[in-house]
Each structure stands twice: as C-alpha cells, then as structure tokens.
Amino acid sequence: MARTVRLSVLESGMSAERQRELMGEKKEKCGVFGVWGTANAATHCYLGLYAQQHRGQEAAGIAVSNGVGLTAHTGQGLVPEVFNDMVLSRLDAQAKRGAIGHTRYSTAGGSLACNAQPLLESYIGGQVAVAHNGNLVNAGALRRRFEEAGHLFHTTSDTEVVVHLLASPEQQRAVDPLAATLRHLQGAFSIVLLFPDRIEAARDPWGWRPLVLGTLPDGRPVVASETIALDVIGATFDREVEPGEIVTLSDAGVSSRRFAEVADPPAHCVFEHVYFANPASTVFGQNVQVVRESLGAALARESPAEADWVVPMPDSGRSAAIGFARASGIAYREAIVPNRYVGRTFIKPTQAQRVAAVRLKLNVIGDIVRGKRLVIVDDSIVRGTTTKAKIEQVRQAGAREVHLRISCPPIRHPCFFGVDFATRDQLIATGRSVEQVRQFLGVDSLAYLSLEGLLSCVRPPAAHWCTACYSGDYRIDVEHPSTDEVLTPQLRMFS
Ligand code: SF4
C-alpha cells in the first residue's frame, strides 16, 4: 500500500510485477507531468499520469506544493493502484500552487519501492521534488564521486545524482544552480522539478525524450511527456520544450532560459515512433499513428508477400499492419485477440512460464487463420522468445503460411538512453543473419523495414534521429562517462 509522507521518498509494501514484464521484451522509461497554479492540481496530475501509463507501469507518484513546502505520495503499481479518492483529495487540498507526477519503469536502479518518483528531498536551497524520463550515462561516475565525498544515497536510481549535484556547493555558488547542475548530466533527460514556488522543466541538449508544454482553459501552464496527457485534461498543445532549454512555470507565468545550445545534430529517439509513444500523441512534431501507418506502408513496398490476410500482432503491430494492408491491397483481419485481464498474479520468470503467459495472453481465432497465408506485422523483435511463442500459437491454430514483417530494422545494440532492451548477447538479431532469426522463429519468411525506410517516414533531416539500437551510433561516449561539465565544440554552454 502506498502512503503519503513529507520530506522523504515513500516506501510501499506492494511488489506486484507487471504482466508487461513477462509479455514484453522492451520497457520504456517513464512519463512525466506537471501543472502550475490551477485548482485540483493533483487530480490533473493523476489524469495526466493515467494517460501516460503506457510509459511505465512499475510505480507512480505525485508531489504537490502549497507554496511553502512540498508533499509527495508514491507507490509501486499502476496509477489507479497508487492513488485512491482519499489520497487524491488530500493531495489536492495541499496542492495550492502546483503538482508534478511520474510513471516509472526502471532502466536504471531496478524495481525497488525507494526508486518511485518524484524523489522528494530537502537541501540547502529548500525542498525539491524530481521526476525524470531518460537515462543518465554518467550517473554511476557522479555517484561514485559523491559517495567518496561522504554523500549518502537512499535510492539506486540514476535520478538521485541530480539532487546531489543541485545541493553541492559548486552548483549553489553558480548564478543559476539548476543550469549548472544540468550541464553536468550526460545522456537522456526530460526532467521536471517542483520547488515550493515554481516548476522547472528541462530537456537534454540532444532531445532524446519528448517533453511538451500546454495550457489549460483557465490559462494555467502544463508540461508533459506526451500530448495525450494534455488532451485528457482539456489543455491545448503550445510547443515542445527545446533541447537544452529550461522552462519555468510559476505565478509569473511561463519563462524560458537555456542551459545549453541544441546539440548539432540532435538525437530524437526514433523508437518513440516505432513503439513507445501513444498513437494519439504528437511526438517530435508528428502524430504517432500516422508515422506507424507510414512504416507499415514502407514495409509493404520493401518486402511484399503473397497472402490472404494482413494480421497485426496486438497491440504493438496494429498501426503498422493497417499501413501494410492499405499499401499492399491485402485485407486486414484481427485474428490474434489479446486478453487484457491476464497477468496481475501471473509472475513467474522461468522460460516455460513466460511461454504459458503468452498463451494465456493471446488467443488466435482458428476460424480466420485456418488454411490461410498470413502476413503478421509487429513493431520489433528484441529477444525473440516471445515472438516465437506467439508464432507457434498461430501455427497451431492452422495457418498455412506465416510471413512476419517487422516495422523497424533489426535491434542489434542496447539502448543507453532510457529504454530497457536486453543486453547485446540477449538480442536475437545480434550476431545472427535475418535467415537465422527466421529459422529460430519458425516463419516462412521474415523481413525488417530498412533503416532508410524507417527514416523516410519521420520528419527530416535523418541525422536528427537517434538510431543507435539499430546502427550502434551512440552520438556520445557511453563507455567513458565524465563527471565534468559537458563542453564540446558543437555544444557551446551558457554560463
Ligand atoms: S538507442 Fe534506440 S531506443 Fe534508445 S534512444 Fe536511440 S533510437 Fe531510442
């Protein structure tokens, strides 16, 4: 059960694993939300987090400001499990100025109750609550430096180093302590910080993760990972927070300053469009559903197949399958039906149990697939074991041919920027040819969308997208993280 405390991150007794962890092979890290100056700020936050539940199902939290101090409530589980009417009413009563929130899926730090965000801390500058989407590649180096200097950490999350940086004398002496803090971070961060008198929202100079600004009908400002969170509370989309920008939401309105120039080129995560973001969201200037349909159409042009039906792998392959069917002229059929109510207690991590979980999760409609040639469209393959189990189910239901089409290139490299893929040796495509993967999966044909095909569907220029999990081009040195301020010729910092 989650509980509310002041001045400390809460522990929660709930330890529920998510079905998604069993069924899925990729986890996105976190959604953030913030609203300033409106009544019922905590309820707005709750709705904004609910809309971004797909970005993290491991833990959720809300921190609120009454103008003088902060209070937080966090816990493990889904948003509606962490908050009930009583908790929300109490938070709303305390949220006289504003609130921020977070949905979490761990990519750094593990699935521990202490890592639920927002992290709420007291330091020399007062109180601060932090909600972070992304992954800091130099968090380990920074943490070691602080621990050697005697600092105590109470989470295993990479985000905690942000507070230690902010509180350190070096940053506190700076003209702009937050800007000085952010300049020490390397990697991906779309971050929202709540202070008693304001919210500060910032995005790393590469813009790996999305972060958008909006306005409620009463004129109050909102910040969120995705536009779908603005939609559910009736807020309009204003603009993205720019890479390298800090935006302040306060009683004085919205103001902006830079802590760094935009990296040249930036590195927006293309996988947000392939898989992560909600289809209803506009991410990096493009609607996600529209992009995914384009990916499917490009895949149909690159790798056509003779078939009776185009069948989506639910739910991740649905949008691309629609595009594939439209471009190929082959009829679209829903033949694999997900059971959305499975799994809350089905938590066994062995391979046999994973396979059983897949069978419980998906039902194949024999009357549709029996004797038919199918094109099955999915967004990606990570380890391949889940896909293999799904394909076996389709075969057993009587499909005559199975042609698997994947709406992105083979994932051959791990992500260091906020996505929990498997390690390199667990990725099915690493060190294997497409033919070897086809044989492993047991399909009649297998084709991935090319990197060129993927980049032709997102907004140009192509160089502005991170494609590291496909190409291995990480843009920054992930092997040798530094604790110094980031200063490169391409990245002139402002003091
Ligand atoms: S490595 Fe892949 S998943 Fe990670 S940020 Fe880059 S494109 Fe996105």
Image (cartoon, rainbow, N blue to C red):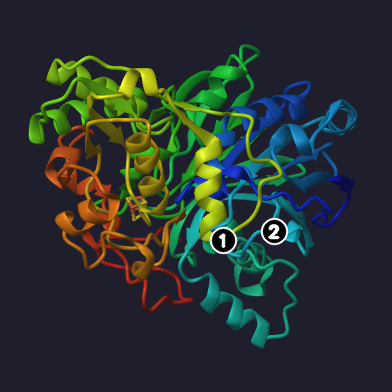
**Up/down of 363 relative to 190, above or below:** above
x and y percent of residue 54 in the render? 54, 36
Which of the 4 image quadrants contains residue 468? bottom left
Badge 2 marks a residue whose secondary structure is helix
Q: Residue at point 43% right, 53% down?
A: 204
Residue occupying the far bottom of the picture:
148
Give the residue type that dot 2 points to. Asn
Q: Is residue 182 visible?
A: yes
Instruction: Compare marks 1 and 2 and give the one earlier in the sequence.
Output: 2
Badge 1 marks a residue whose secondary structure is loop
Residue 350 is tagged as 1
Depth check: 422 or 341 in front? 341
Question: Is label 1 or label 2 in front?
Answer: 1
260 relative position to 47: left or right: left
Q: Residue at point 54% right, 75% down?
A: 140
x and y percent of residue 200 in the render? 60, 44
